[in-house]
Structure formats: structure tokens, C-alpha cells
Amino acid sequence: MSADSTTGPAGNDRDGSLHGARFAARASGFHPSPVRAVFEVSMLPGMISLAGGNPDLSALPMAEIADAARTLLVEEGLDALQYGSGAGTETLRQAISEVMAIEGAHTSPANVQVTAGSQMALELVTTMFCDPGDVVLAEGPTYVGALSVFEGLQAEVAHVAMDDDGLDPVLLQERIDEVKSAGKTIKFLYTIPNFNNPAGVSLAVHRRQAVVDICRAENIAIVEDNPYGMISFDGSYMPTLYSLDPDNVFYLGSFSKIFSPGVRIGWVVAPEQVRGRLQIAAEATTICPSMLSQMLVVRYVRNFDWRDYVEKSSATYAARCAATMAALEEHMPSGTTWTVPTGGFFTWITLPEGCSVTELLQPSIENGVVFVPGIAFYADGEGTNQLRVAFSFEDESMLEEGIKRLGATIATLAAGQAG
Amino acid sequence: MSADSTTGPAGNDRDGSLHGARFAARASGFHPSPVRAVFEVSMLPGMISLAGGNPDLSALPMAEIADAARTLLVEEGLDALQYGSGAGTETLRQAISEVMAIEGAHTSPANVQVTAGSQMALELVTTMFCDPGDVVLAEGPTYVGALSVFEGLQAEVAHVAMDDDGLDPVLLQERIDEVKSAGKTIKFLYTIPNFNNPAGVSLAVHRRQAVVDICRAENIAIVEDNPYGMISFDGSYMPTLYSLDPDNVFYLGSFSKIFSPGVRIGWVVAPEQVRGRLQIAAEATTICPSMLSQMLVVRYVRNFDWRDYVEKSSATYAARCAATMAALEEHMPSGTTWTVPTGGFFTWITLPEGCSVTELLQPSIENGVVFVPGIAFYADGEGTNQLRVAFSFEDESMLEEGIKRLGATIATLAAGQAG
């Protein structure tokens, strides 16, 4: 609430009542959620946050990046501070195609649309394909920010369950049949095949062709979101779905985990004619991506040993994941289970039978640890006994203490349930 | 078209036909337009472009800004490269409220939502209020990028004609009555009261209260877009509509003309409860505004004599406008008229009776000068004998030569019409 909430010249509308009756139907998708409160709680002193998925930036060569930013502005300031192409710069689109090739995804710069983060790329693709009431398939659980996009654009979400090998092709086919017999139109499968957020599992290589084939046969596009693919603890990369069917897969990429989320640079790869339309939609949103950010990213990719940074930070995340796994083993009461990530930022915890994550949240916060409740990652009310733990940002000792606090809180809750 | 357009693994869809049938109804709003071709033509060697509205950045203290960027990353790099609040940083929101106060618009940082340019702010507000088929009132002509937003969100546009004093309140009331009797719902008036893009005129001070009162009485919100307010040739600022009715006016602001479009930082001021919803919608689009850009803007506002830059560049624009006016007097055939701006980037030209701007465009390009045809600035097919001239980016001698070429082309066309 603003400081002048009751003192504006007209003085009668700082609560929004004047505008409430004017809202569009789609505005109802933009409502405060319990998840948002969690992120605010994360900031409280003494709180250990297992909630946010912030990357650890401490291994970035900051002094060198600072010099690069200075040199960029000295050498190319009039371009870096000006409007640019709505598609993104040619040099960045070229650099992106080279970054993608490292994971075996080969594309042309002409197919790359740069966006203010891959979140925006997902919104553009959803805008382009989904009429209100159209169905998007998504893993259950899936990325909370994707659910915001789908809800805001009035698309319905049908979840497909995962196991330790990710999305199950058999369940995928079943869900497609089910949605189709309900007379609904499926526009695409949204999937995070590598180190899923929030589930922490990956789509097994032997399942990838099957997923691609099913979507082709059913005339459903695939939107492959791959922000974590290079955050691989053993340094190996899995084949992208894009590489298996480039004409039917929209590939979303991001510099947030391999460089910086603060520059807000992501992208989508699309067949050229669709990319042209995505550019027009992107221009309606931001005119063009930030030239400053784009040109800094180009210098980062061209002038730095950025793969060394990715290697170093992946090692950091691997160590934090290992500490988290060890702490879970030590501190979780029996009946609690979790996934064992081989990359990425997250593990997914299932509470003992009968435990409600909603009931767990407040006592956990009182015990000085916060997480995101599982319900945030489902559009259908599932996840009531699950939660996401992020191990990307806190260090090992904080992670251990956080898991210890969480384990004790779960144990108390479980004992109450049992008693 | 991509270099590998026929050689992808599936090899059958680089023309987008696979996806064509999947497009949402709203995707039809994102189609290539003749205006886009104009901007590409602008890049041709030897072409004088009166098309683009790029600011002139040559008076920016570039070396100092480069140093500021370096210092920012050295001192606060871990924040500048990280995710941040979806609302924008507290310090930037505070700085924005101070920038607005210079034009007499007083708000609280709590009412400010930072966006990746004010284009995005307009899209958020339109998303929030307009269901498909809802009506937006807008000046005729209006900003082409606003029309993209309205078309993409399937809002209908009803234009209100301007004269040299801007929007006419009598015509505004008439248009409102007309739209209402057609049974349609008007959600807001979109207006650029200061140095209108593309018309080059301003809403006279004596009309401002009337416009605000009519919208209040008719329960229509106002979206006031004010990127050019400080680009005033005599240094005086007009009262914002926001200052006249802060509860009913959504104010869009931008750093693109007073600092840099390349950082993509704009904002919207809204009553706090609406602002909260705008934040949720903004997060669905970009998660958060670029921290790097936001923090650089704060340093620009805090550490530089930025008002001196605005003064210097306004003087540059004033000189270019004067040169344009003199050239128009000298080179335009009789029957051609134009507006006389007192600020901003544009003048609006009306061709002699019977001349079609569509017929003018190609011969003009052949004569080495390009502009944006008037039809781009209307949703209803008007503007067929009008065009926009931007004097912001080319220097005086280029402007004079460009106008000379344009005048000769118009004279030839008019002679053909007469003959």
C-alpha cells in the first residue's frame, strides 16, 4: 500500500475499486498467490531459504566483466544505448546458435528470436498458439512461471506425471487421448527435459524419441525449455528434443544460469515463418531486447572462458546437491522421499503419508526455514504433500542446517498426524 | 529465410506450414506490415530516413557512463547480474517518482511498476483491462506501437480527431456517445498529450481538465503516454493528465528519450492495488526488469547532470525541427500542410488534395528519402494522404536534403494528379 494511499487528490481509489469493475476476464489470472508470500519471507533475517532458484554468481569474473562493460560503452556506446532490431542483434543470434551447438542443437541465427528472458519467449509462443480454453500439456509438477503464463492467457493445463526417468511416454499418450476425447484442442507439450524445475529429474534418453514421435503423430508442437541443460554434474549433455525434430520443437534458451539473470536475455528457436510472427509479437511487448544486455552477452560469450565458469558453478551446485542429499538422509523422518538430481538447482520432496504441505509451511517458517509448497507447481490442486527444495543459492552449511530444521518440523507434523 | 531452410532433419517445414493451422485467433494480429519494410529501407546506403524515431545520443557523456557501468559492476555486480523484484528496485522507483515530479506529477514509489520499456507497460495495462472486442479510444493518428498492442490483444480502436490543440474534447464526447450507442464497452482513452507521436501537436492546457472530466464522468480510464514531455523546445512543461486525476490516469513513462532506449526501462504509475496485479502480469512476461539496466539508470539519474543532457538534446531537436520547418516552407508544393511542433521528434504532413501516400512511397524511396505513411498510425484505414516525418535523428543538412527530395517527389505526384 502506498504511503499516500488515502491522500491522493481524488482520494477515493487507492484501493483500486474504481478499476475493479473494468478488469478484463483475463485479469483474474493475475492474482496474488501464497507462493509470492514465500519469496518475501525468504528475505527475513535468520531465515534459511530453500525457496528461490537464484543462481550462485560468486564465480563470475566480476572485475573482468566490469571492464568489458566499460569497454563496450566506450567502443560501441551509441549502439548499445540505442534501439535495435526486434529480432535481436545478428551477432548475438550467431553466438546463441554456437552456444546451442554445444548441447548438440544445430540451428541458424535466422531461426533465433531474442527475448527479455526465456519467460518472455514462453509467453510469446503461448500467445501465438493458445486461444482461451486450448490445452497445454505439461509435466506434473512443472515450472511455476509457466503456469502463470498459461493462466494469464487462459490456456488450460493437463499434467503428465513423471517418474525418475521424467515424463512417461505411455502416460503422455493416455493423457492426449483423454483430452482429445473430452473434445479439447491440445496446442503443445511444455517440457523441461533436463534437470526439471521443480522435480529435479531428467527425461531419460531412451524416452526422448518416443515423446517426440507421439507429439508428431498427434500433431502437437513441443516447447522445450532448457535453462539448466549445461548445469550437468558429470559434465555430460543429453540430446535436446529440438535436435530430434527441429521443425516441431520450439526451443527456449536462457543466459540466466550460464551467465546472469540480471541481464534478462533469453531466446526461442522457431521455424523462420513462425519466428517472424514471434518477432512482431515481441516488438509489441518490448520493441527490441535491451541492446546493452545483448552486446554485453556477446562480449561474455566471445571474450571470456565462459565454459570454465559453467564448469566451476556446476561443480558448486553438485557439491551443494550432495550436501543436500546427505542432509536429507540424515534428517528426514521415515516415509519422506526425494528425487536425486544429476544437475540443475532442485530436489522434489514427498512428505510422509497424511502430511499436508500447507500445514507444514507456517511451522517451518517459525523454525527458520522456507520452501515452495508443491501445490504451486500444479494447475490442478495436486502437490499437497510435496515441496521443492532449491540448493542453488545457499552454501553447504546453510543447506544442511535448513534441511535439519525442515526435517525436525516434518517429524513433528508427522508425529501429530500419527498421534 | 534461414540458410538451412531446406536442409533441416525433417526438412519439410521451414515455411511454417506445420504450425499455420495451430495458430490462435490472436496470432492473426501479428502479421508483417508495410511499415516494417520502411524501416528496413531506412538502412540502405544513401537513403535519408525521415522514418525512425530514434533519439540522438551524441550528447550523452559516454566516457562517464562507461565508467559508471564499470563501477556499478565492481561495487554491486552480484546484485546487478542477479534476479530482482518484479516491481523494479526500490531505488529506481524512488528515482522515477523524483523524475516525474519535475513535470509536476507527484506519485509514490509504491505506485510505480518498472517495465522493459513503456511499450511493455502499455501492453500490461491493455491486458489487464481489455477483453477481445472492448474499445480503446485513441487520437487519430496515434503511436503505431500502441496499435500493435491493441490489435494483438484484440481490442478495437476508435479514433478521436486532433487539431493544432490536440484532442478535441467535443469530438471526444461525441465519439464516446457513438461507441456506447453501438453497445460497446470503452475501457480507456490512450493519449500522448505532449508532442504527440506522430502528429507533433500537444493537448492545449485549457483542454486538459475537460478531457479528464469527460473520462471521469463516463467511467473511462486514461492511459497517458508521456515519453516526450521533457523534450520541450522552450523548456516549459505542461501539466500531466495524471496530476489532474491521479486515481483515474495510468501514467506511462520512459527513459528512452531522456537517457537511452537501449537499456529498455520504462514504467507505469497505477493505483496500488492495480499496480500489484500489473506486477504479477509483468512477472509472467519477464520475471523482473533487467537489474543491470535499472541500476545503471539509477546511477545516471543520481550521479549525472542528466537535466543538462535533456536540455542539450532538446536544443538539438529544436534546431532540427526549425531546419525541417524551413525546408518544408521552401520545398513543399502548394496544398501541402504540416504541423508545427514545440517539442518532441515529429511533424505530420498532409498531402495536396488527391495525392495518395501509398503512391508516394515508392518514388520517394527511388529518390533517396523514406518516411512512414500515415495509414500506419490509424486502425481504421485513414491517413491515406498523410505521412510522418521524424526530425530527431538526421542532422540539419540531411533533413533539408531529405525534405527537398520529398517535396520534389510530391510535386511530381501532384502534377500527375492534376494532369
Image: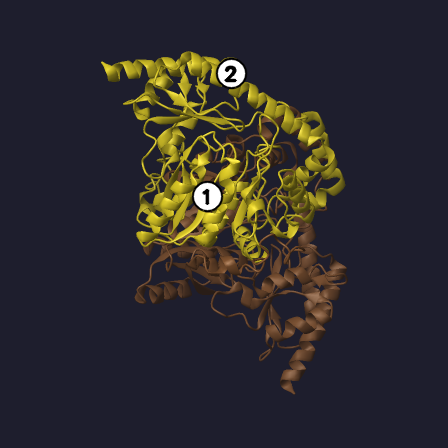
Chain colours: A brown, B yellow
Q: Is residue A270 visible?
A: no
Instruction: Count numbered badges in the picture.
Output: 2
Left or right of B291? Residue B252 is: left
Residue corresponding to mark 2 = B323
Q: Secondary structure at mark 1?
A: strand
Q: Position of residue B177 (x, y in %)?
A: 35, 49
> Residue B12 falls in which quadrant of the image?
top left
In the image, which disc is placed on residue A291?
none
C-alpha separation, residue under disc 2 versus residue under disc 1: 31 Å
Residue most extreme to the front = B206
**Residue B359's x, y, as percent?**
30, 23
The C terminus of chain A - image quarter:
bottom right
Taking the spot 30% from the left edge, 64% from the top edge, the residue there is: A183
Where is A283 relative to B275, above or below? above
Residue type indicated by callout 1? Tyr
Q: Quadrant of residue B236?
A: top right
Crowding near the residue tagged with mark 2, few <14, some 14–19, many ≥20 C-alpha atoms within 10 Å: many
For the residue labelled by badge 2, is the local secondary structure a helix, a strand or a loop? helix
Q: Amino acid at mark 2?
A: Ala
The first of marks 2 and 1 along the sequence is 1
Same chain check for tags 2 and 1: yes
Identify the residue at horizontal 59%, vertical 66% (top origin): A34
**Which residue is at the far left?**
B419
Q: Label 1 belongs to which residue?
A: B190
